[in-house]
Amino acid sequence: MLGRLADSFSGAGKTQLLLTLLLAAQLPPPHGLAKSAVYISTEAVLATNRLAQLLSSHPALASLPPEDKPSLSRVLSIQTPDLESQEHILRYQLPVAIKQHGVGLVILDSVAANYRAEFEKKGAGGGAASMAKRGTQLVQLGALLRELARTEGIAVVVANQVADRFTRAPSAASSNAVSRTTSANSQGNGREHTPQPSMPSQPDVGLLLSPDPLALDHQQKWFTGWGDNQYEPEHAQKTPSLGLVWTNQLACRIALLKKPVFASRPPVVTTNGADEWNDEETHISKWRRWLKVVFAPWTPPSDGRGVEFEITKSGIRHISKENNNHSLH
């Protein structure tokens, strides 16, 4: 992935993945790059406590000799609270840091935060003009990061955010009606969505797709990471922040999916010796998580939801598909 720009989506799984990459980049080949890493944050500060925990508890890291073991001193961290400071750091300070510290990996977490704050605050302007300005800035950011990746021979990983995508369920009475899908506007392309005739529902597609193969509603299932198989119901559909403009800047996209696992509670509970009726008979007992390659030039898209994993004290671990009890390999 050297010399390329990739993004992934935010969440607890995202944080653990990025922290693991910061340490793995320091490992000697073929497991790493034997180089330092830069973490650029637009929101929370770098979780150094979690990095230290991974160093001491991850089996592959804790067993390394001192000369090969990753170090927190080789992880450079800086915050960019607004677009102005972000632009200055990426354009002027980052190239210098890459050369001085032998950096092989740059992580930007997350790319959407400053743009949301800048363009959603009062007085920032609205409508097509504001979206066009944001689109221009995203194209410039993508070009800057790609050029940096190529010239310096580094990997650039960018964390993104997602939002809910709403669709209108098809019915016999409305099969010829106009689709009211709002996904085009949520993609942030700055143009009003052209109404398209809706299609009858298909059993293996969770979204109501446009019959026009050139329409965004038809194409987006192949580059968002959601809606391209029967595993995701309509209410679980997401759309990546920054829309199609940002998607076109990427060489690779990785989606981190999660699904709640519900457990039943007893209908009657005892509190302080008194029996009470439990109104909530089910609750979320845990989350299941998957890592999915949406698109990349070096590998095909993942099948289904992708590779299931879990977050533990020692890091991220793959969960075997073959074992119904989800034992770990």
Image: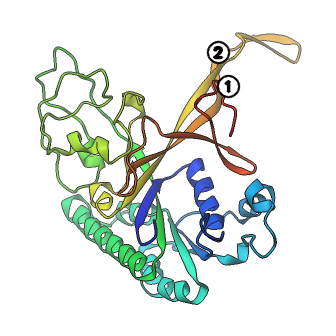
In the image, which is nearer the foreground, mark 2 or mark 1? 1
Q: In which quadrant will I find the N terminus?
A: bottom left
Residue kind at label 2, given as amino acid type: Asp
Please name the residue shown 17% across and 26% down the image: 199
Does residue 280 appear in the picture of this structure?
no
Residue 240 percent location from the top left of the image: 38, 50
When asked about the image quadrant of residue 206, the answer is: top left
Please name the residue shown 36% across and 61% down the image: 251
Residue 225 percent location from the top left of the image: 38, 44
Q: On residue 325, which mark appears?
A: 1
Q: Does 252 sit above or below residue 312?
A: below
Residue 29 percent location from the top left of the image: 61, 69
Residue kind at label 1, given as amino acid type: Asn
> On the rendered structure, is 138 left or right of 31?
left
Please name the residue shown 75% across and 49% down the image: 313
Q: Does 71 sit above or below residue 250?
A: below
Label 1 sits on a secondary structure element that is loop
Q: Nearer the viewer, residue 249 or 295?
A: 295
Label 2 sits on a secondary structure element that is loop
When asked about the image quadrant of residue 58, the answer is: bottom right
| Residue of label 2 | 279
Which of the marked residues, 2 or 1, is nearer the chain's N terminus? 2
